[in-house]
Image (cartoon, rainbow, N blue to C red):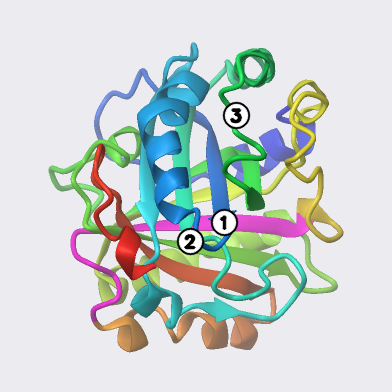
Amino acid sequence: MPTPAMTTTRDAVAPRGRLRDQHVQIGAVWVSLMEPDAGFEAAFNQWYGDDHFYAGGMSLPWIFAGRRWVSPRDHQALRISEGNGTFQPPEAGRFLHLNFFSRGHVDDVGSALGDTIAGLAGEGRMYVDDIPRRHVFSRIQPYVGAVYDAPDADGPLDVHALDYPFGGVVLEVLRTRPGHDREQLAAWLVHDFIPAHLRSARAAMCLVCLDADLPDELANRTRRIPRTYGDDADQRLTLLWFTEDDPRDGWQERFTPHPDVLDEAGIGRMEFASPFVPLVPGTNRHIDTI
């Protein structure tokens, strides 16, 4: 991983970035949508925020950024879901965890992550019975690139997206329509759809990732993470829209039109979309509203 097809897609459709030297580059994005069982939200948040976010992620080599997000109830009410088995019920996946892996070292991260999770489990630090939860959508996704609202202006680069104090992020999962492939959809997204909608979405940037199965090394050691989600994972893409404000505000004008635009283009369809706000490290802020 990444496979040759993924590399081809990235090279073929990657948008032009900001006009600044960038020696650190994103190779893949860990996108993990998690759902603790009812009544375990605070315990899950404390365990993940105090221990697992660091011991199971940020302390690993070649992971250089991370951030945790949450979707409160009033944000969940705005979600778009086509009703397939992956994103059911629609409110599932209230916690979103994102990490950036360095380009050229994605395989190294996958191997280290598998060893790390196995080690934490051996120490009794995974709490699989004490804090029941499920992975709604957890993927190591090869990175295509970023589209910026103002590419020639000063501002954060894609590598800063998880450190810059953005007010929110919108996760969208798209799938190609029959007769089209993911390279076509990715090219249309980065050159047409995203540039045309960044301003109306009030987003500073949108990151484009490719869906992918978990590497063997990680999947064999983390059996609670499903290997696949539905069929044809190679037909999916993920978009991450980073906003200065809470994306719930003005949601109907900013993001609700996206599925219709996709339908009109006939290339892809929206499987899932949800707004999230950042969790505040070390606190249970927002937890009583989810």
**Residue type, mark 1 in image:** Glu
Callout 2: 10 Å neighbours few (<14), some, many (20+)? many
At 44% from the left and 36% from the top, the residue drawn is 48
Give the structural element (helix, strand or loop) at label 3.
loop
Q: Does residue 146 appear in the picture of this structure? A: no
Closest to the observer, 75 or 201: 75
Give the structural element (helix, strand or loop) at label 2.
loop
**Residue type, mark 2 in image:** Arg
Find the distance from the CA under tag 1 to the CA under tag 2.
Answer: 6 Å
**Residue type, mark 3 in image:** Met
Callout 3: 10 Å neighbours few (<14), some, many (20+)? some
Start and end of the magenta stretch? 235-249
Closest to the observer, 236 or 223: 223
Closest to the observer, 104 or 92: 92
Q: Is tag 2's residue or tag 3's residue first in the polypeptide sequence?
A: 2
Q: Does 202 appear above or below 135?
A: below
Q: Is tag 1's residue or tag 2's residue first in the polypeptide sequence?
A: 1
Q: Which residue is mark 2?
A: 94
- Marks 1/2 in contact by CB < 8 Å: the verdict is yes
Q: Which residue is mark 1?
A: 35
| Mark sitting on residue 126 | 3
Find the distance from the CA under tag 1 to the CA under tag 3.
Answer: 15 Å
State the image coordinates of residue 259 (x, y, percent, origin top left).
55, 82
State the image coordinates of residue 17 (x, y, percent, origin top left).
35, 41
Name which quarter of the figure residue 205 lies in: bottom left
State the image coordinates of residue 37 (x, y, percent, origin top left).
59, 58
At 32% from the left and 64% from the top, the residue drawn is 288
Find the distance from the CA under tag 2 to the CA under tag 3.
Answer: 19 Å
Does the magenta run of residues contain 224? Answer: no
Name which quarter of the figure residue 116 lies in: top right
